[in-house]
Image (cartoon, helix red, strand yellow):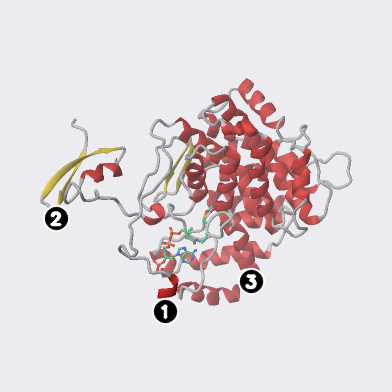
Amino acid sequence: MASPTLTITDNRTGKRYELAIEHGAIRAPDLAQIRVAPSEPGLVSYDPALLNTAACKSKVSYIDGERGILRYRGYPIEELAEKSSFLETAYLIVKGELPTTSHFKMWQRNITMHTLVHESVRHFIEGFRYDAHPMGILIATVGALSTFYPEAKHVTDLESRRVQTRRLIGKMPTIAAFAYRHSRGLPYVYPDNDLSYTGNFLSMMFKMTELKYRPDPVLERALDVLFILHADHEQNCSTTTMRVIGSSLADPYSAVAGAAAALGGPRHGSANEEVVHMLHEIGSADRIPALIKQVKAGERRLMGFGHRVYKNYDPRARVLRESCHEVLNELGIKDEPLLDLAMELEKISLNDEYFISRKLYPNVDFYSGIIYKAMGFPTSMFTALFAIARTVGWVAQWTEMIEDPDMKIGRPRQLYTGSPRRRYVSLDKRG
Ligand code: ACO
């Protein structure tokens, strides 16, 4: 069968062009040949927010937004959440295959031996104000790691990339936990490498005077599942930031700092924090209609609802909705008003024409905050938890980009809509 093509007729000139279609896409640079005259600029595609532009080819994760499907390297997210562990899923995402037992042990050891941070990193964190938001500390500190590992700038060196990948996955929980302890004026807890990845993180967060912290297995598993669900999500805002920064061949610590900064916005990863604030603000179910009215009037958004790609229930939210009940039951929390309120809000919204017509469903952030809260995490840590898990996706996508023969520095075009050429008038003549 002949390769698929697209024929375009330029009605300005009457000329016809045949563009190749590959993977369901035309190459935007092929449009550049379409021009009114040889001296005129070629056609570009205008796509603010990259609504319909594939900026890369990727094998890491797959989303079918219409059907509510998410897979990492071909494995459905629901299956990984049920059967895998976060570190095993991290291996899958970074390396492309599930590990054998011996490879998994080596991976676990390699990540674990990178959990400590240099003492100067601790001093650096101590320099922040007592009330600094943990995300601000996390972003700045992960960026500062590039000064501790200057060899990280050798991004085209495979071995260097592997070491920085392990360091980033190993150190993000330590930095996040130190950021929290700093904000509480609590002594920092050093990593305990006898514990699992999430068990150690819980220890660094919550250990007080006990000699050995023993994580509650329910919380440990729940956090593991949360981390699995947040590990990668295709070309979202923060991953795109990671790729664009990385495309200049900047070191991965600087790129992760940028990606984490993008994640920190309320339309992206800090929506989980905003959901809990919103539920507190609503307070009781009888106030939901007033909120919905404000949302419909365009005065505010329902946080934790809507998604650029999912036009169906976010599969991660479905897993978390179930997980919410399980975690609360296991913790013996009989009544969690925020969960009751969230479910009522979901029920009302999903039956409302405004939400139905716009295909707005709960996203991953709608329920994650409620679980984090029940687990004892302060609201200000929610996005940092997201960042720990998403670091895996960021580094996997960054490596994929560096190894991609199509890779070039990210540099979109613009449509200039400003003034035509003007003459400079000196200041004293400007009246
Ligand atoms: N509440 C109310 N209305 C909404 C919401 C919402 N949460 N989200 C979208 N809409 C409406 C918009 O007002 C718009 O309506 P209009 O056509 O009448 O103007 C329509 O739905 C389409 O919205 P867009 O902003 O064009 O959708 P986009 O794909 O650009 O935005 C986003 C996606 C940013 C996630 C948006 O749905 C949103 O702001 N949601 C709330 C924040 C949130 O939960 N973010 C977390 C996303 S998941 C993640 O990052 C991990």
Q: Is mark 3 within 8 Å of ligand 1?
A: no
Residue beneath label 2, please?
A: 12
Q: Nearer the viewer, residue 332 or 51?
A: 51
Q: From mark 1 to mark 3, how far is it between C-alphas? A: 53 Å
Q: Are marks 1 and 3 in contact (CB under 8 Å)?
A: no
x, y percentage for residue 112? 71, 31
Of all residues, the one furthest to the bottom in this rendering is: 431
Q: From mark 3 to mark 2, how far is it between C-alphas? A: 56 Å
Residue beneath label 3, please?
A: 281
Q: From mark 2 to mark 1, how far is it between C-alphas? A: 44 Å
x, y percentage for residue 381? 68, 54
Residue at position x 79%, y 36% in the image: 192
Q: Nearer the viewer, residue 55 or 345?
A: 55
- Label 3, secondary structure: give it: helix
Of badges 3 and 2, the one in the foreground is 2
Of all residues, the one furthest to the left in this rendering is: 14
x, y percentage for residue 167? 65, 34
- Amino acid under disc 2: Arg
Does residue 352 appear in this view?
yes
Residue beneath label 1, please?
A: 431
**Residue 166 to residue 7: above or below:** above
Classed neighbour count for the residue bearing mark 1: other residues with Cα under 10 Å, few (<14), some (14–19), many (≥20): few
Which comes sooner in the sequence, label 1 or label 3?
Answer: 3
- Label 2, secondary structure: give it: loop
- Amino acid under disc 3: Glu
